[in-house]
Image: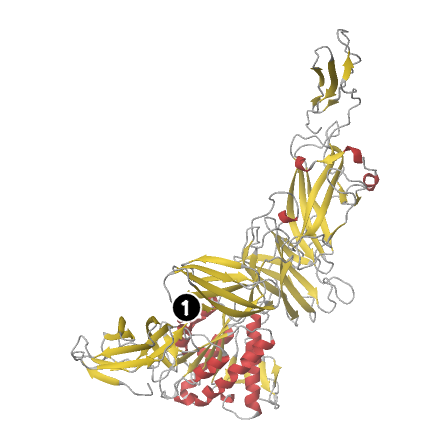
Amino acid sequence: MDGEQRINNKGTGSETVQWKFEGLAPGWYEVSTTWSPAGSYTTGASYFVFDGQSHIDTKVFNQRVMPDDIYAHMNKWERIGYYYIQNGSIRVQLSDNIASQWDMVVADAVRVAKQPLVSVSGSRTATWLHPYDLSFSSIRSDVSEWTINWGDGVIETLQASANHTDHVFPPITALRDISVQATFADGTAASVTLPVSVANYIPGADIVFMVDESGSMETEHAWLNTAIYELEDALNALGIIDNRYALIGFGGSQTQNDSWSVPVGNGNGYWGSPSEMDIAFGLLDITGSEGGQEDGYDAISHALTQYMYRQGVPVNFILVSDEDRDSFNDNLSKSFITSQLSDKNITLNTVVNAYFGVDTGVTGEIVGVDADRTGFVADGFGSYYTVEDSFYTGHGANEGWEYTYSDYIDLAWGLGGAAWNINYISSVGLIAESFTKAFVDIKAKEVEAGLLFGLTESTRLNTIQEWSHTVASGTTYLAVDFTNLNFDSLGNAGVIGSRDINDAFELVVLDTATGKPPVDGTGQKILRTITSGSDAVFNITQGQASLNVAGVVVQDTNGNPITSDTTTGRIYIDVSGLVGKELKLVARLVNNDADDATSVTVSFNSTGNGVGTTAMPTGTGENLLAASPVIDLATRRQPIAYSRLRDVTTAFDIRYKHTSLDTQLDELLATLSLTKRNPIQVRGDLLLTVRRIRTQDQNPVQDSSVDLNLYDGLLLQSVGGVEAGTPYIKLNNLLDRDADGFYVNNDAIEHLRLVFDNIIPEDRFDYEVVLLGETNDAPAFTSDPYAIAGAGSGNLGQAYLVEHISAGGAVTPVLEIVKNANNNQFRYKLAATDPTAMR
């Protein structure tokens, strides 16, 4: 190291170079080596590894290629291996015994680093209710089992071959210590702990800088060291904290103008923090010829093909160059690059040699212009203001800049990004401060606008994502995109109750000026909702037709109306009459069943195609939730014959339909269909009761604060296993009856509503639905049982025939005669059997 290396021609092996590391505590160590590659070096350099005096391994390396396993100490290293050292020292030996007499072997440096048995990789921050990814490994090959303790009461056991998993943390702000333990074949174990801060964070972004390395870029390179910290601060101020940065250099002499991945931080060397980027900027080459080839499209292609990006986070590219494109790959056309970036929804900003102007008088310098042609003007105080209808006015005098507009500016604007005048980077004083402030502010807002939010159910009643937006003049619609809508499959299983309710995905539009369900200051609705008991303007419930109000159009990716099976689509909201209104858009999942697997990804691009200025797409009209059937007032007031009621739930097929929330009124709406199904005869009063409303996820389970709303009365006495005081909804006369007054099989009540009040968004709740009805009339007469008849009298006494003709057939009288033990007396009773089997 330190610039010293030794080179030798092929020999017999008598000449060696040795590296020895002594005083090592027993444990596992990673051993690696480095060299500067050359075409004259050997392809078979043999490295021998010793534990004390014991030879434990030999590895052979090709010294014509660059090491690429590890980046450390400002250098790249090739891993020789992991070794358990117990004799206090490691010795590595390289000999000159190589295959070809024309080759040479080079000895540069060896690195030794103590290693834990178990390594873990994951972000130090996690977001409520979003999947958190964790990777882990061991340097030992005999792992028999992995145990992950997530620190929130969940412990996961995985098989030996596993190397990653994920977890959804509950919505509680906390520092979780994730423990990862490997159990080995010999029964021993090793573990490592990763502290993770869990909160309601917004996901971060993946941001790639692509920087020209020609000799004229020295000042611009220095600006990057400041800009990276200010950009991170601006993102953090918006709550966007889990950001990753990468760096690509292009047009440098050391790489023969090729694009290359500048190592950032430790690990794989691709992604890092602002402080790690600060160091990485120092690795950029500034010795490239000003007449060299700087192909920014090659850098973009390199970023597209050589980097892996996180799902669900915005990806932003920032290209910095003081010249236009010098193409050396004709396959990378502008249309190709545009399609590649557009398909992956990547925003591009270009910091290039270009000037901007505006027709109206502007006293300051326009440092940049975004895709909407909004210019950012230095205000003379280190900040900026905006001006509309800005445009590109030209480039500097250098001939090499003449295609800057078509190569870079038009490309950035077409992808929703901004273009910036690189000349102000090298300025001093307030104008340079204005440039940096405008640049980082607009970049942060672009990232915020492009955020994709993954909503996944947990034990919450609702899971939401919100966006605030003020409707500007000329805006015709707002659009919210959803992808990967996947409902879980539990519904309608077992006892009819809360755990059978269908999940729903909804969109709500609120007026933030009042905080109420969409009403403005005069009390007029901004947008109507799909029904009373809901504040949603759009609803798709598992297995049901979607609902939307007038002024809301929902289409799939082909522009067709969505169906109950649609997983990806766009929700358009007509806001042409709401200019100046401060709106809050809320996307949410509604979940009161027993599982938590429903998920969807949503996004609202407030600086891009989420804000429309063209005609609103044409839909199929509104589709509101049908009104609930009601009985007449006179029937509702009739007294209930409690003595005749029984539990008749099994005589009906009860199915949940639509589900919705009104979080402003703290209400949950669930609609039902109720169909008469089997031969059990039911007539008279028919009551739907909701009993035992209790917490679902709390331990121990307890009575819930939730109440049934919009019921007809409370039971005055216990009946059919349902407690007195339980609310009921009267269903008399809502089903057809036959001539004898019995409800007809296969007739149904649709759109029956259950409205629950006093809900808590964080808590699911349980309840049971029980139907009470009259099954048959009571017998007119029953004889005294077991009357005694004297021996030999031939007289059975008084007998009565009790017969009741019903729609189900005649009631059959039964005379039961039992001879007693002395054979001279008989006991008898007369009873009736009911063919409906209800008595």
For label 1, the SS is: loop
Residue 74, percent across and down? 39, 82
The quadrant where residue 293 appears? bottom left
Left or right side of 56 for 340: right
- For disc 1, the neighbor class at 10 Å (few under 14, some 14 to 19, many from 20) is some
Q: Is residue 501 left or right of residue 78?
A: right
In the picture shown, does residue 431 fall above or below 335?
below
At horizontal 67% and vertical 42% (from top left) the residue drawn is 673
Which is more toward the observer, 550 or 736? 736
Question: Which residue is situated farthest in the bottom direction here?
Answer: 428
Instruction: From the viewer's side, name the closer residue of 522 and 693.
Output: 693
Instruction: Please state which amino acid type lies under the numbered disc 1.
Output: Leu
Residue 707 drawn above or below residue 250 = above
Rendered location of residue 614, percent (x, y): 60, 66
**Number of numbered discs present?**
1
Q: Nearer the viewer, residue 449 or 263?
A: 263
Horizontally, is 172 left or right of 779 in the view?
A: left
Camera sees residue 504: yes
Q: Considering the image in quadrants, where does the C terminus appear?
A: top right
Q: In the figure, 287 relative to 408: above or below?
A: below
Tell me residue 56's x, y (percent): 28, 70
**Where in the figure is residue 646, as x and y percent of width and height?**
73, 35
Residue 613 visible: no
Residue topped by disc 1: 117
